[in-house]
Amino acid sequence: MSESKPTIVLVHGAWADASSWDAVTRSLQSQGYTVLAPPNELRGLQSDAAYVASFLAQRTTGPVVLVGHSYGGAVITNAGAQGGDVKALVYVDAFIPDEGDTVVSLLAGSGSALDVADPTTVLDVAGYPGAPEGAAEAFLKPDTVHTAFAQDLPEADRWTIVATQRPASFVANVTPSGAPAWKTIPSWAVLGTDDLVIPIGLQRRMAERAGATISEVAASHVSMVSQPEATLAAIQAAVDAIG
């Protein structure tokens, strides 16, 4: 891969893994980019961000474009200034928190399909070994995947998400965010106008608050899967801007 190009690091969100970036990864690799898609542990915002920052510090050299989807946006917000030479942040259908924000507080009153009085109507909840007192992890119910998370994907792909999803601890969604990397690192944001998990109004407010360069795509919460060209265009714009 070309040493003159920045490394692209892709951080997945909750209920996903690095395979959610497959279309983006393959296209970038075909253009000569080094692409890394580390696991996001989905256990707690600060520990997840510490892991990604450590990964950046140890696994990258030279400039980095750091990309986050959904909850991964909160992770890169906290990790971006803590490890590696991150020159740009790209948010895809993502949370872009300010200091003190939590995922739950951002979703409150947004109209999100996940902002419901009884979370067990949209999520299946299970304990896990080593969980903090009172903590559990959440899986998307099949109906939630089909109607609110990935409604623009083929049915077979939605069923694959149901089967392979990586659950997130509730701890991750209630941990306050730290000092945001977007205050010192330029950012780009791809907003899915048909996103029912992070509704477009909330996405737009967060992106504008962060001073991000905004683009929109008529897609669900997983636009990098259904319409990867929008994510690729934002990444290329970030690369061009940082020289």
Image: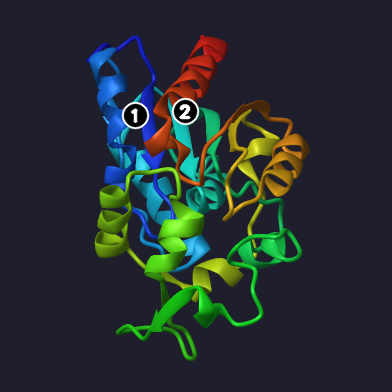
Q: Are marks 1 and 2 in contact (CB under 8 Å)?
A: yes
In the image, residue 181 lies at what x, y percent? Answer: 61, 41
Taking the spot 37% from the left edge, 38% from the top edge, the residue there is: 225
Please tell me whether residue 243 is drawn above or below residue 47 in the rendered image.
above
Q: Is residue 38 visible?
A: no
Q: At 37% across and 54% down in the image, what residue appears?
A: 40
Under mark 1, the amino acid is Val
The mark that comes first in sequence, 1 or 2, is 1
Whether residue 132 is visible to the viewer of this picture, yes or no, is yes
> Mark 1 Cα within 10 Å, few/some/many (few <14, many 20+)?
many
Q: Which element type, helix, strand or loop, lies under badge 2? A: helix
Residue positioned 30% across, 31% down in the render: 23
Q: What element carries label 1?
A: helix
Q: Which of 19 and 240 is in front in this view?
A: 19
- The image position of residue 123, as x and y in percent, is 46, 75
Residue bearing mark 2: 231
Q: Is residue 85 left or right of residue 2?
A: right
Q: Where is residue 148 in the image (x, y as percent from the top left)?
A: 51, 57
Please give the residue where the numbered disc 1 appears in the rendered image: 24
Q: Using the image, determine if residue 216 lies above or below residue 175.
A: above
Give percent across and percent down for residue 134.
Answer: 49, 90
Q: What is the quadrant of the N terminus in the image?
A: top left
Q: Examine the image and state in which quarter residue 26 appears.
A: top left
Q: Nearer the viewer, residue 186 or 58?
A: 186
Left or right of residue 101: residue 75: left
What residue appears at the point 25 percent right and 55 percent down from the top-left corner?
160
Q: Which residue lies furthest to the bottom in this view?
A: 133
Q: In which quarter of the image is residue 194?
A: top right
Residue ranking furthest to the front: 155
Label 2 environment density (alpha carbons within 10 Å; few <14, some 14–19, many ≥20): many
| Amino acid marked by disc 2 | Thr
